[in-house]
Amino acid sequence: LGHPCSLGLPCAMLFDPKQERTIARLCVLICLTNLVVSSEISLYREDVLNVHLVPHTHDDVGWLKTVDQYFTGANFSIQNAAVQYILDTVVRVLLEDPTKRFMYVETAFLKRWWDEQPESLKQKVKQLVQEGRLEIVNGGWCMHDEAAPYYTDMIDQTTLGHRFLLEELGVAPHVGWQIDPFGHSAVQGYLMGAEMGFDAMFFGRIDLEDLDKRRKERALQMVWRASASLGASADMWTGVFGSGNYGPPPGFDFEATSSNDPPIQDDERLHDYNVHERVDAFVEVTKEWASWFQGTGPGGHLMYTMGSDFQYSNAFANFKQMDKLIKHVNADGRLNVFYSTPSQYVAALHAANLTYPLKTDDFFPYADNEQAYWTGYFSSRPAFKHYVRTMGSYLQAARQLELVRGFGWGVKNESGEASQKVHELDYVSTSHALEQAMAVAQHHDAVSGTAKQHTTDDYITRISAGADEAGALINSMLGFLLKGGVHSNFGHRDPSDDILGALQSHHRVEVVKKMRRRRTLLDAAPGEAAASSFGPDQQEEDDDPVFDYQDSEDETAFEPESPQQSSASLHPGAGLSELRLEQCPLLNVSVCNATESLPAAGEGAVVVVIYNPLAWPRKEVVRVPVQTIHVEVLHDSCEPAVSQLIPLSSMSKSVRAKTLFKDQEQQAAPVYELVFRVAVPPLGYSTYFIRRTATDGPYNKGLAYLSKVTRVPESGAFETESHRLVSEEVITMKAGGLVAHFSRRTGRLQSLHNTADKTTVRVSHELLWYNASTGNHRVNPNQGSGAYVFRPNSTTAFAVDTSANGNLQLSVVEGPVVVEMRQQFADWASVATRIYRSPQGGSESFVEQEWAVGPIPIEDGMGKEVISRFSTDIASDGIMYTDSNGRDMQTRKRNSRPTWDIDMEGTVFNEVAGNYYPLNAVATIRDEKSQLSIATDRSQGVASLKDGEMEVMLHRRLLADDLRGVGENLNETACGCTDCDCHGLVVFGRHAVMVGKPDSAAWQFRTMQQYLNSPLVLAFGATSAPAQGCIADSLTTSWSMIEYPMPPNAHILTLQELPDGIVLLRLAHLYESAGNPGWDSDLSEDAEVDICTIFPYQKVVWMEERTLSANQPRNSSKPLRWQVSAKADHENASTDDVHELNRQEPLAMQNEHTVQCGVSTVVRLTAMEIRTFFVRVQ
């Protein structure tokens, strides 16, 4: 064969000229591992079925025990599991017997074990890995969930694991192994599969009806074309285990400590000799399993996963039984059984040149029994899900600033001398602890919300510790930059630069012009009242009570009634030496010591440094708590900024009083939210100042406007801010490009109108709850709702209200920055619906809904699953669209599955739970005229149970366990206990609700998705300022690390310094190709980015394109290609590629002699494409 393998027989038997690469890999594997010791012994046989025994263990990175307890074996009272002993004994067995094989997955455990081993053993393990006898599959830090994580976090945790494997073991995994997640996403199929360079991927769990159909049709193995935009270029061969799980075949679990299966007793002198019975049983179960797969006749191949959760703690016992099985089954002659690995099995299948059905949808939702849909975990532990999502973006911000610190960018002055500020830098704090904590949190029992409470607490503790260290890094770098740590020509760019000048070198001019018409974020300078060209249509004015906050150049329209004194200006340089930045991690519940403890009037101010982790400039509204109404906000020019004081909501006050503060004075202190607009450059920061003002004297124009709060009576006239008596039934709010109508009688939303494209959607909103089942049903009577499973007692959702007539308590909060309707549904549930004087304007206008739910009452003995439901006049025809981990939009048809017909009369399907899907970022419904989109700040569950409806599950508090192993009720409390006398957890969250025409909807929701999932980072520092002048004169108040923003359809996903000084750079296209739900007529076109422009103050001297996890050069990664049958997996799938795809060839490695900025460094991104690079700069 021309390969270094002289064992001709097995290779010759499989040889096919078209399969040379596969055979070469297989032959080298056979040769290296000594599976064949002479030409007389063949690994495979042509006359019988070849059975691959793949020994494995599935080691959860936390679940019933914490990750460290699982590694050490601690807390045996919960579970007998100790990963360190699994690896100890497995390695010993492999070293003693070259015929044996093992595969391993979880790098988080492997690294813990590796760090404890002597160098001599490490070298032996490397040899095992290189020989393929110890195969690492998947290779991520954990086996991540697929419903709850954001795609950025999935990539990060996989990259962390792959980097360790490459650096320490010199190996790049080629097989995906997602055997335990509870459903499988499209992003997993193409992004975490083909784009990783994998040859194949294996699953354990799919829906029981899907499993049954695939068994009958011998379609458990398929080619998965999971991205319509990337088409066949990202196909992934996918295999589902015949059992629907990942354990060994029934009757052959050889784990001595937990299995009741009879061992093989082959000593005829003993009374329980059972070789014949055991061999016959194995042959019979293999016949059944072989009937579920194609290519399992004589000479064919079947794989068994020989292991399960935390097995092989005494690997000698497991292997001893498998040795006996192999010996006696092979002696029987009806089967050929041997030790194998997933790669070896995949290579054998590929050599057989079979054809496979094509699948184009995903694997959600998942049911494993009657009325047992695993759709509850989409929403379980909503506060933890939000924390994980927020910290993912925080990690990106820390990495970006860590990169600046690591390269010493700007630490020299213009003469090349070291800056005097360098000594102030914190070179100790890193992002590494947060990186590892976030990687652990992506585990399929972590962010999913399905671990025990004490394990979840451990996840949170790890993230918090990592965030503290990353926060120290961020504070140090922002403080360094703020106090002049960069020379004058580094990183300075006016965020108001014209969009054409900013984007012309990156994107086609005609697209940019269209984007300007869409009112991008770049067309108004910081602090300007951005006069929107999309004001309300005056012809539509009616007699409804109107709270109209269109932008006004006359800001004195919002002067308070009583005059106030202007305080002294800030003194340049005063207090800079003691300025130290800190952050406020409890801003989500309106707690921040820095802003609640403002210096006395005339004695100083609080500096607010606002960092933007996105590569686009942003204009947003910032909220911070203050304890006084005598306060003002200043721009970096020390000119007053428009600001507004809003009374704290009753829910926030309750959290402060019951949970956060024991001190009565702190509880009783009046707290307001100070709200003001900010403008921040891309990958950079802006600076604002908050200071206390005097309480008497002449009025200061910059004083924060104290909102007018109006309690709306159900009838009779009331007075608005404009002193207009109102008695109509409809209340109208207008701002930016949006108009919202509310029913005065019920307090509920009635309609939304986008004034830019003249789209009006009649929409009502309400909070409701499902009564969670505790298992008191005729069908599957023990099945209740729990951490995994959602099972409502009926299809009825009950209204959240405490009033006799069902009407809400409604109040209006008005001011120059925002107007909001506060709806109190009950004392434990409220919604604030806000419309901002939008700096975006036009089609980016949105309604923000801040919801607060908890403590969910359970005193009535009923567990509750709380939802937010939107009902519209959109004729959605049973169709809803949801994102896949923040990427491609998926089509969801009510009461339907693309792959099989649901038995609506059967006992499996649940009409509520069976229509719930993961919502990671965006969900939409639409018809030909209009579209409603909801963007969220965390992963949740979403459903469309009627045409024109969408409902999002917000919070769950349950009184039963769902019998899936966790053994606890999902009863989250403020004390962190599940069975104690403590009130339930209060959770706050945000939804952005958008309406518009379908052809512009993707622009709306993709932009909002980026903002919600990459929040601004705020740092605060107090400084004294007793004299006159402006402190900004002594500060670098605005800074950006890039010269131009990214094109509006592209995103810098990763910007990270690796240990060897190389920059890891990822670029992502944000839109889908034509014909897909995430398509935009302008923005789906290719985006071009010159990598040199990302490093404008450095010289690119080397670069190389890599696979998605950066563990291989892209041009040398050539995953196996598979034959697709003419018959698709389902009738809606096309076996032809969905469109002609013209992906740019991988960029070749370039050095300082071949790098040509603007030529060889220009990257073209097609729709939905992510490209990864190593870059070295000077």
Image (tube, rainbow, N blue to C red):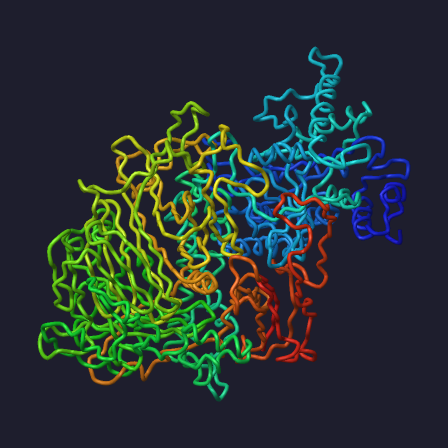
Residue at (82%, 48%) from the top-left corner? 23
Residue 390 lies, in percent from the top left, at 41, 57
Outermost residue to the front: 539
Q: Nearer the viewer, residue 467 or 949?
A: 949
- x and y percentages locating residue 868 in the rendered image: 34, 47
Q: Residue furthest top?
A: 271
Q: Is residue 861 above or below residue 916?
A: above
Q: Residue furthest bottom?
A: 415
Q: Position of residue 6 (x, y in %)?
A: 89, 47
Give residue 475's position: percent from left, percent from top: 38, 67
Residue 662 appearing in the image? no
The answer to whether one can see residue 655 in this image is yes
| Of residues 1153 and 603, the one drawn nearer to the viewer in this rendering | 1153
Quarter holding the C terminus is bottom right
Q: Is residue 812 left or right of residue 121?
A: left
Up the image or down, 635 lies above or below 304; here it is below
The residue depicted at 13 percent of the width and 52 percent of the height is 715
Using the rendered view, name the quadrant where residue 1105 is placed.
bottom right
Left or right for 107, reference 996: right
Q: Does residue 942 appear to the left or right of 711 in the view shown?
A: right
- Residue 946, located in which quarter of the rendered image? top left
Query: Which residue sits at x=57%, y=35%?
Result: 310
Q: Is residue 73 above or below residue 360?
A: above
Q: Is residue 468 above or below residue 630?
A: above
Give the total number of marks visible in the rendering. 0
Decide which of 211, 681 is in the foreground and name it: 211
